[in-house]
Amino acid sequence: MMIITKAKQGAPDRFWKIATWIIFLLVAFFLVYPFAGLLFRSFFSAETGKFGLSNYKQFFGFAYYFRTLGHSFAVSALTTFFAVLLGVPMAYAVSRYNIWGKRLLRILVIISLLSPPFIGAYSWIMLLGRNGFITRLLSGIGITIPTIYGFRGLILVFTLKLFPYVFLYVSGALSSIDGSLEEAAESLGMHGVKKLLTVTFPLIMPTILAGAVMVFMTSLADLGTPMLIGEGYKVLPVLVYEEYMSEIGGNAAMASTLSMVIVVCSLTVLFIQRMIIGKRVFSMNGTHPPAVKPLALPGRIALTALCYAVAFLAVLPQATTIITSFLKTKGPLFVRGFSLESYRSVWFKLSSNIAHTFTYAIAAIAIMILIGILSSYVIVRRKSRLTSLLDLLLMSPYVIPGAVLGISLVIAFNRPPLILTGTAAIMILSYVIRKLPSILRSSSAILYQLDPSVDEASISLGVPPLATFFKITAVMMLPGVISGSILSWISTINELSSTLILYSGQTGTISVAIYTEIFKDSYGTAAALASMLTLATVISLLVFNKITEGKGSVV
Amino acid sequence: MSSSVRIERVTKKFGEFKAVDDVSLEIEEGEFFTLLGPSGCGKTTLLRMIIGFHAIDEGSILFGEKRMNSIPPHRRNIGMVFQNYAIFPHLTVAENIAYGLKARKVDRAEQSARVEEALRLMKLSDYAERSPAQLSGGQQQRVALARAIVIKPSILLMDEPLSNLDAKLRIEMRSVIRDIQQSLGITTIYVTHDQDEALAISDRIAVMNAGRVQQVGRPREIYSRPRNTFVASFIGTTNFLKASVIASDETSVQLKVLDGGIIRLPQRRARVGDSLSLAVRPEEASLVGANDGTTVNGIITKATFLGDTMNYIIELPNGASLDVNEYATAADSLHKCGDRVGLRFDEKKVNIFASASGEALA
């Protein structure tokens, strides 16, 4: 009797247990195993092949290697500084003053955030590079501007590309502060700046920090931008890439060591953030939204202009690429007049890249949705030690830069038991691993909001638990999952860092093509491809806004 | 078909904690039975064991003669109304109600007939095609109830169904629930922490505390003859006065109230020398002049006008205070703060409890 009992009640339990274990094994094989391999590899000397710390000694001993760590930190720290300097005041202005066109401003900022960073680099080269439009314009009247390549260019591109993180995080926090808190401060005699310093900023401090960490980690991990605009100023991901390329066929030992250095840096930053925030997280549910201060006309015009100037700079790369894509070209040179030549040559030469981008992204998103729904369900609703571990593992790609992940996958899957290098599968795999965290986060968030008694109601009405999951729970999770997956989709089609490591002649994507076209000086075709990506990004963003009724957050 | 429920020595442990501790209950067919107790008393856990969301660690639960321990929830044919309604937000009102019928593969014609009937019964006919988000709390509650009864469950379970409604709607809905239950004659088990609700709606009540059943009985029994001090203080308001038995014979017992006078009650198994608590409800005491042959005297420290009644807090010389109600219209004149008054207790209604065990001496 008891045995029958257990079997009957255990059927859904068993399903979830099996599902959990399958996901866990997949994660172990496709994420833990490659990463462990990379870690292991980093201890084998690049020269002698002996086990030990020699690579690490070499890294810290040779200025050539060690200097890049300093470069990376300098770039990321300054970028973060400027991003906060730009993002926080702008967020305050937009959420607290009656400037015009707030929605358009937000959309411009989001577009700049969601489009690939290397397009920014490329466009700024088009404008301010050695042969840039503005450079030539200014030299025509005898002005020479400082070079855009290297350190300054990196800071410029990263800041304009990443300040939106700070802006979006902070404007969210500013509008969810309960307005009565600030009113209370005023009633107690704290005005103006004092009020800001004693109430408003302490409350949004954790949010500013979270935005800053996003900026820091993203700029630390990015490969495409420094490859294009960094030139002699080498940062860690570039070094990883170069070492990896020179070691191909070798054992990728130094590349592994450098990869570990980046991961440790990311982890340290994350850890410091946790330490600082600690328990200082305030849950705010603004029932009484803060008041928007009306400005007099001159102030209103000035503030609006200022905000739009920043937003304009942020989307300037996108505008530049779109315009450039319609210019007439002659080889690497642009000539007077407009044409569709660039698009024509993309169509003839590179249509397979376009097909690859979208088919890989579709495949990756489908897998992500499936794994995302199932694993967020077991993580939220069937908590156990195994599911917490699964949560940790699935979220861990946040701190693994794309290039590092790419290298770890190559090392793991260029030999038996499973050879995947050069296939589409390995690229889809890397997209799934890299972008799954955001789907997981959005579907977990919605699951936390769903009351488990809704499932129980369905079961009580006679629908077995598993059928209930598919009929009720999954259906209710869908809006959150879909909006999350659109964001993943956008970042998947724009992905370059791991793609650059993993692509082969048969599996190039649009982003790879842009990158290689730029190196071939085919700026026109690069611009046409970049415009296509921008268009796809904007359309996806509009769909996202439609689904979330404008309430969805992209960060 | 409606069914009786037998709960036999059921226990539920969460780790070492016994949420439900050796509970036995018999609920008759067609009865409206309420599990009443403070939060954490185990009432909801017991309800969830009846529907099957919690496994039964020890004991058994039977519907009629059928042991349910091994039957999964979706095959128990129980209608359940949840505290937060648990309406499916992505389905319309009519689809919500039809959900259980679809699961039972009831044919289409009958499905729509039964949905229509349920909508009519719950006065929801105008809202059939609405989405749940457009409904008020009371209407959502009706949808939840309609959805639970349309499947013709053998038992209806309700888990604090009215706790999210405002006071007025709560009173209205409880009579709706009671009327529906009566007209369908369906065995209903209702969980609440609200004693007024329990008294108003139930055929019988089981008062629970710390995982155990304290008393089972009709509402009047529970209110007027609580079996122990927990029930006496949980249901309604009760003043406890320390007292000891000074004389006892065939028909009556005489108590000396601590720092007070003597009161003679009908005999209730009390022996001379017993120390006990005299339990007096606010309406079982009346205010008279001080020292006018009264049991205790005191000073009014607070007088609150409540419309139909006056509520007085009276402080006794030994520092204890009593809560007393008087019909505002019945009193000759209303007393005020600082008045010295005497109290007389209704001997037939007051209860006594053994000091040591807290059990009623009846």
Image: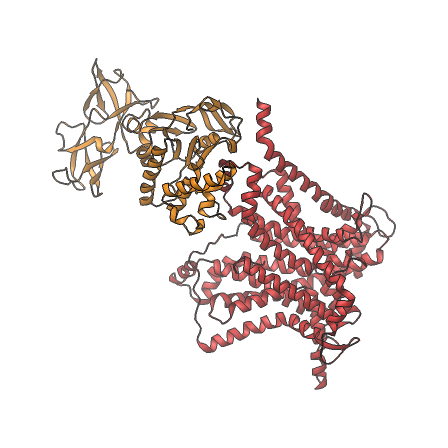
Residue found at x 52% / y 59%: A549
With respect to residue B75, does A101 lie above or below? below
Identify which residue, B56 or B231, lies in the foreground.
B56
x then y, percent, for residue B304: 22, 43
Identify which residue, A16 or A215, lies in the foreground.
A16
Q: Identify the image quadrant of the N terminus of chain A.
A: top right
With respect to residue A72, does B125 lie above or below? above
x then y, percent, for residue B249: 21, 13
x then y, percent, for residue B40: 43, 34
Asked whether residue A201 is in view, the answer is: no
- Which chain did the renderer colour orange? B
Asked whether residue B210 is in view, the answer is: yes
**Chain A: colour as depicted:** red
Furthest residue in direction right, as rendered: A48
x then y, percent, for residue B71: 53, 28
Q: Is residue A396 left or right of residue B341?
A: right
